[in-house]
Image (spheres, grey):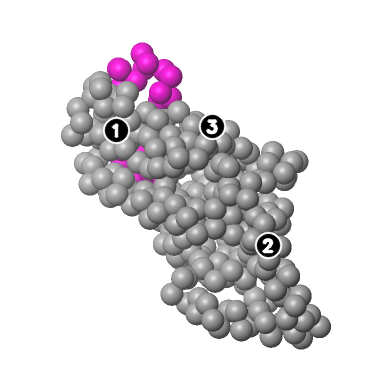
Amino acid sequence: MKISINKDSSVPVRDQIVEQISLQIASGMLAGKEKLPSIRALASRLGIHYSTVTAAYNHLAEVGLLDIRQGSGVRVASINNREPDPSLRPQFAVMFDDFLARASEAGHSAEDVIALFEKKLKNRRPAKKILAVDRNVDFHEVLLTELRPNFKLPIEAVTVQAILENPALMDDAMVVTSLYHLFAFHDKVKDRTRLVPCNIEPARQELEKVDELRSGSLVLLVSVSMTLMNMATKLVAARRGEEIAVRSVLLSDETELRYMVNHADLILCDSPSHATVKAICDNKKLLAFKLYAPSTIALIQERLAKWG
C-alpha cells in the first residue's frame, strides 16, 4: 500500500489517508482480504501519531471498506470471499465440479440441479437498463456522461440509500457500482450475474502531471460535482501540499471559470465539463479525467453480452 501525506497541507492528515486508501480499494490496487500495515506500523512509517491512523482506519471500517479484527490485523473487506484476481480463479470445470460436490453433500439430486438451472437461466428476461449506483447524487451526472455513449440500453443513476429502501429497482437491470459502495448493498442483489463491481481510475496520469509542476503553480479543478472536487483537492494536497495552489470551480460558475482558466498552469476537469472548458482555455494545459477506464467499459459490455 502506497500512502504519502503532507503535514503542511490544510487538508487533515486523517482525510489524506482515507482518500488514498479509498481510491486504491475502488481502483482495485488493493484487493479483497489484502492485509494492511498495523496502526502503529503505518503511523511510524508516516511519522504521525497512531491515533490519526486509528481514526482513518475506523472510518474506512465503518463504511465497509476495511475489516479490523483482534488478532488478525487490518484487511481490505471481501464480499463473500470473492477472488479479486481473475488469473487466480479456478477453471470453469473445476468450479462446476465443486458446485456439484457441495450440492450432493447437501442432499440434492441431479434432477434438483437441472431444475434449478432451468429456472435460473432459461426463463430469465434480458436486462432492460443499466443502473449505476453511487451514494453521491452529484456524481450521477459524471457517471451517466461516461457510460451513455458506450451502451444502447437506457442508463439510470440511483443512490445506495434508494437501493436499500427499494431493492426492486435492480430488477431487470445490469447493476454497475464501485467497490466503495458495493459493500453497503451487495446482500440485496438477487442475481449477481448482473452485478458488475467496477474499478475507479486511480488518476495516475493526472497526479503525475501535478508532480511535474514547479512550486508556486496553480491547479484548477473543474467539475459538476463538489464531492469529486473535494476528493481531487485532497489527493493533490497529499502530493504537493502548500507547494502549489489548488482552486476548485463548479462548471455552473461561468464567470469564475472564465477568469481562472487564464491563470491556471494545469486544468483538470471531469467528462461533463470537458467540452465547455476546452472551448475557453489553452488545450495544452487541459487534462480531462474519467472515472471509468476503457477496460471497465469493456467489462460491462462483456457481462451484458454473456449474462444480460
Q: Secondary structure at mark 2?
A: helix
| Label of residue 267 in the image | 1
Q: Which mark sits nearer the N-terminus, 3 or 2?
A: 2
Nearer to us in this view, 60 or 104: 104
Q: Which mark sits nearer the N-terminus, 1 or 3?
A: 3
The secondary structure that dominates the magenta segment is helix
| Label of residue 293 in the image | none
Amino acid type, callout 1: Ile
| Label of residue 120 in the image | 2
Residue 189 screen position, x and y as percent: 68, 54
Amino acid type, callout 2: Lys
Of labels 3 and 2, the one closer to you: 2
Residue 71, visible in the rendered structure: yes
On whether residue 248 falls in the magenta region, the answer is yes
Amino acid type, callout 3: Asp
Of labels 1 and 3, the one closer to you: 3
Q: Which region is colored magenta? A: 235-260
Q: Is residue 147 above or below residue 64?
A: above
Q: Label 2: few (<14), some or many (≥20) within 10 Å?
A: few
Q: Secondary structure at mark 3?
A: helix
Residue under label 3 = 138
CA separation in Å, label 3 and label 2: 36 Å
Residue 221 screen position, x and y as percent: 37, 32
